[in-house]
Image (cartoon, rainbow, N blue to C red):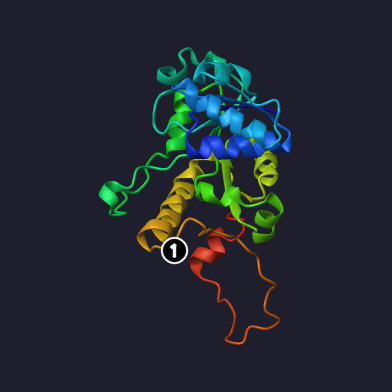
Amino acid sequence: MKIGIIGTGNMGRILGCGWAVHGHEVFFGARNPQTAIEAADLAQKNGAAGARAGSNREAALFGDVIFYSVRDVEPSHVIGDISALDGKVVIDPNNWPIPEGKFDFAPVAQSLAEKLQAWLPRSRVVKCFNTMAQELFEMPVAELRAQKVSAFIASDFADAREAVVGLARDLGLAPVDMGPLRNARIVEPLGDVIRYLILGAGLGPYTTLKVDVLEPAEAGRFGGRHASAWWARNAATSR
């Protein structure tokens, strides 16, 4: 798969290198060309001979999938003519800034991913990769895969979600389908939770979120679930 990295910061560099080593064609783009060149050199040193580097505009034109790690900046200000992204899968991995270091986040009325989709009406935006620190991807893929770290994926386009499911698995993550893009409003606060645990609670960058489905109890020791009015109304439609 051809992947363009727009904004080669920490996450763009490390995920891009991971995808390149896995065999994808990766083009690192950055405002500062030297940043992109260094990322491509790093990928090449790890065995990804085809990694390339250039401008954000060139990365947009190159990729079938775009990793857009420029937070809350209209794409036209980053790449110029946004028609370069028409029809493409655009991954938004971003979180809102931490308010003055106090983790006092406002409720999410419109997610960053929804905002990006409004800016790119002819692209297929996917929310993913906002709930982990980049340090995780320094681990070998097999070791990370064994940890079953969740990657929460939301998009209005099923084929775009499936593409990102594959890319998440390539990195050693366990995809969790979060449905339509409006559910990025609940995925983005998960990024706030993990950042609080890493920074606020001091647990460090290897703190992760995992979704696990346990085997059901053989018997309800304490009476099991009693149906409520809400449950009766919503149980069938909420699945």
Q: Residue at x 48, y 27 (%)?
A: 35
Using the rendered view, name the quadrant where residue 143 is placed: bottom right
Q: From what the image shows, is residue 172 above or below residue 54?
A: below
Q: Residue at x 45, y 24 (%)?
A: 119
Please provide percent x and percent y for residue 156.
58, 36
Mark 1 sits on what residue?
203
Furthest residue to the right? Answer: 23
Q: Residue at x 43, y 17 (%)?
A: 76
Q: Is residue 79 left or right of residue 41?
A: left
Q: Residues within 10 Å of mark 1 (few under 14, many from 20)?
A: some
The amino acid type, in three-letter code, at marker 1 is Leu
Q: From what the image shows, is residue 207 above or below residue 119?
A: below
- Number of marks in the image? 1
Nearest the viewer among 90 and 235 is 90
Q: Is residue 189 left or right of residue 225?
A: left
Please provide percent x and percent y for residue 221.
61, 87
Furthest residue to the front? Answer: 45
| SS under mark 1 | loop
Using the rendered view, name the quadrant where residue 226 is placed: bottom right
Please provide percent x and percent y for residue 93.
50, 39
Please provide percent x and percent y for residue 6.
51, 26
